[in-house]
Amino acid sequence: MKCHRWQLGKLGSSLLVLSLLASAASAQIAVSANDNKAVLVNGATVVPDNPAPDTVTIIDLNASPPKVIGEVNAPTSVVGPPQSVAISKDESYALVTGAFKIDPTDPKKVVPNDALSVIDLKANPPAVIATLHAGKGAAGVSINRAGTLALVANRNEGTVSVFTISGKTLTPAGTIDFGDTKSGPCHAAFTPDGKMALVTRDGDHKISILSVDGNTVTDTKKFMVGGYRPYGIEISARGDIAVVGNQGGGQGETDTISVIDLKANPPRVVDTMSVGQTPEGVAMSGDGAYLAVTVTNGSNRAKTHPAFNDFGLLQVYSTDGTKLTKVGEAKVGHWCQGAAWSQDNKTVVIECMVEKNLQIFSFDGHSLKPAGNIALSGGGAGLRTADR
């Protein structure tokens, strides 16, 4: 049977459209918040002259190798845990906080900021569609799996901001006040069922338990104490455990991560283990089978400091109930922050402030192997994927 040229052309166009739709559907989005206001100079964080705007980079982790698919300018900050990014479950939008901004009265200093940007990931190109105000030092941010609530931990005022969500529209819905501006809320994370949230507080070393009932969030006044200066926190998609990175005293000692048993009533810390100097980021794989920990390892110190090491560490642990077992470790760059997993658990990426890149590692369940890197337009300060 003969086919006319216009029919072949139409068929080819249709196949191309289907191919592009399939590619978009198979993408797994990671979002990196990049800070251009902070650079390391001999172990000290300084504001560079005439810094470029902060940026947010959108990455496809399902591509081989992972690739950048978009970028937008938005306020970010390396101050606070690298969970300063949250992505909706359907990957249609992202929330990015900016804990600090340049002091308008002194371009060589930074001051607390309260910015919360809403980024439309489906727009072409991606775009900031709203800028809201949380609290001073807006740091860790999370969206519940139902897509109806967001929480922002405000490190510089001792509060957590609550926002309701409708589509891509956020509306302020109250504040949880811990009664101490120095309590230092760093990150707030929802349990998978959305009925509870945990908040790390590095100012007074507590992990607060919040109750969530619909759009109402309340402080139960219950808390846990696991380690010194709890910072980043990740909750397994299985809903059985949470893992907290404890920043420690910053003098070069070996610092820790703590495991929380979420099946206990109330939840409690059941294990704490050493990981090295300053666990900056903690990231669970989407199925909860593995935990990645980025360890600064003294890589952000002056070279003359006795605790300096010329590399950071990426550690991977397998999970078995509340038991963590280290299964892999690799040397990475300097002052590295967040980590993220591909959906098949075969790729781990981390972002590094000094190198201004995303470092890619392949993982076979037993070992990590370097697999390239992606240049970022600023120091990688926050990195997340959507919760499954």
Image: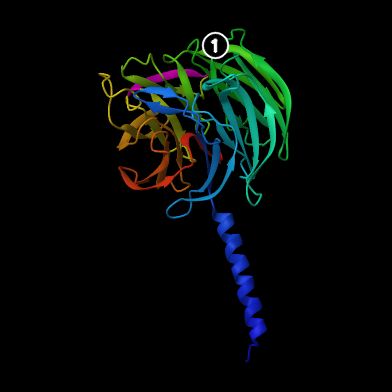
Vertical order, 382 against 43 (above or below): below
Q: How is the image coloured?
A: rainbow
Name the foreground residue: 175 vs 311. 311
Expressed as whole percent of the image width and height from the top left, the position of residue 218 reads 67, 17
Amino acid marked by disc 1: Ser
Expressed as whole percent of the image width and height from the top left, the position of residue 364 reads 34, 47
Q: Answer left or right for 359 relative to 156.
A: left
Expressed as whole percent of the image width and height from the top left, the position of residue 123 reads 66, 49
Residue 275 magenta-highlighted: yes
List the residue tagged with mark 1: 183
Residue drawn at the location 58% of the way across and 60% of the way down: 22
Expressed as whole percent of the image width and height from the top left, the position of residue 265 reads 54, 18
Vertical order, 233 against 292 (above or below): above
Range shown magenta: 267-277
Helix, strand or loop under label 1: loop
Is any part of residue 189 visible from this angle?
no
Q: Quadrant of residue 166?
A: top right
